[in-house]
Image (cartoon, rainbow, N blue to C red):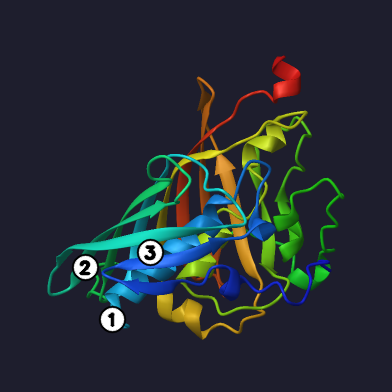
Amino acid sequence: MSDAAPEVRFATDSAVVGLGDGRYRVHVTPRWSAPIGPNGGYIAAMIVRALEAEIADPARHLRSLSLHYLRSPQVDADAEIEVTVERAGRSVTSASARMTQTDVDGPCILGLAALSVPFTSALDYSTPMPDLPAWDDLEPVVFPPEAPEMARRFDTRYGLGSPPFSSADEAVTGGWIRLAVPQPVDAALLALMVDAWLPSPWSRLDRLAPAPTIDLTFHFRAPEVALALAPDTPLAVRYRSTTSLDGLVEEDAEVWAPDGTLLAQGRQLALLRPSRTESS
């Protein structure tokens, strides 16, 4: 099991405080940090909460969110998220979001989002969940002491692909994951899960290479199914990459409910460069 302290709660660490005029204050805690700065999914979760608070329409679920990570926010510090409703139609609301910090020159994060009511579909289909061993048949991952603090916030169980730094032929990894301290499976949590795993390109490497995010797009599927799940439900996940060129790598992420319902998708572009020690 994870050694995350019981008081470390994702909902609290990603909470927003309304300041008026579309502005929200957040606190960027180091408890959800990756090797280089706060995790991209954690930052996205705070923006999700600001968007939902500003739109304040439970009939319009978040469907799409595209973020550009211009610079890493400082941790253990407050930040401000400004949400602007760009257009509110009969069925779809489009909004922009901007995260800034007082001591940082220029915006840290820029985003565009779409929230909508459900529509009648001409055809329903989705990517099937991979064939994974059952949750109870897999051992929890025990991360080494040097792993990022964020890793210990999850109960993670490998069930797909190759281990990191194993020089595998494919950049594919996945399995089951849930928070060590259960929280509702809302859009903010799904944003976190899209970026919660070790980067899939690490399976093809034989040593560490930092992979900071440049841009990350989230698509949220079946929101009512997600919200109906028990907070301690493990989610099936798969992360894979096909291309790394010029020090840039793409990764696709998929998150499913245990019954095979696709809950979220993500695609990101990240840097993949040698570590400073290796390149020096």
Residue at the spot of label 2: 93
Q: Residue at x 49, y 77 (%)?
A: 226
Q: CA distance from mark 2 to mark 1?
A: 10 Å
User: Residue 119: x, y in percent?
Assistant: 23, 74
Q: Is residue 50 above or below residue 218?
A: below
Q: Is residue 79 left or right of residue 180?
A: left
Asked whether residue 100 is in view, the answer is yes
Give the secondary structure at mark 2: strand
Question: Quarter-wise, where is residue 92 in the image?
Answer: bottom left
Asked whether residue 155 is in view, the answer is no
User: Residue 146: x, y in percent?
Assistant: 83, 45
Q: Is residue 240 left or right of residue 121?
A: right
User: Residue 269: x, y in percent?
Assistant: 47, 38
Q: Nearer the viewer, residue 198 or 241?
A: 198
Answer whether labels 2 and 1 touch (C-beta < 8 Å). yes
Give the secondary structure at mark 3: loop
Q: CA distance from mark 1 to mark 3?
A: 27 Å
Residue at the spot of label 1: 57
Q: Is residue 228 left or right of residue 219?
A: right
| Residues packed near mark 2 inside 10 Å, few (<14), some (14 to 19) or many (20 plus) | many
Q: Nearer the viewer, residue 231 or 5?
A: 5
Q: Earlier in the sequence, mark 2 or mark 3?
A: 2
Residue at the spot of label 3: 125
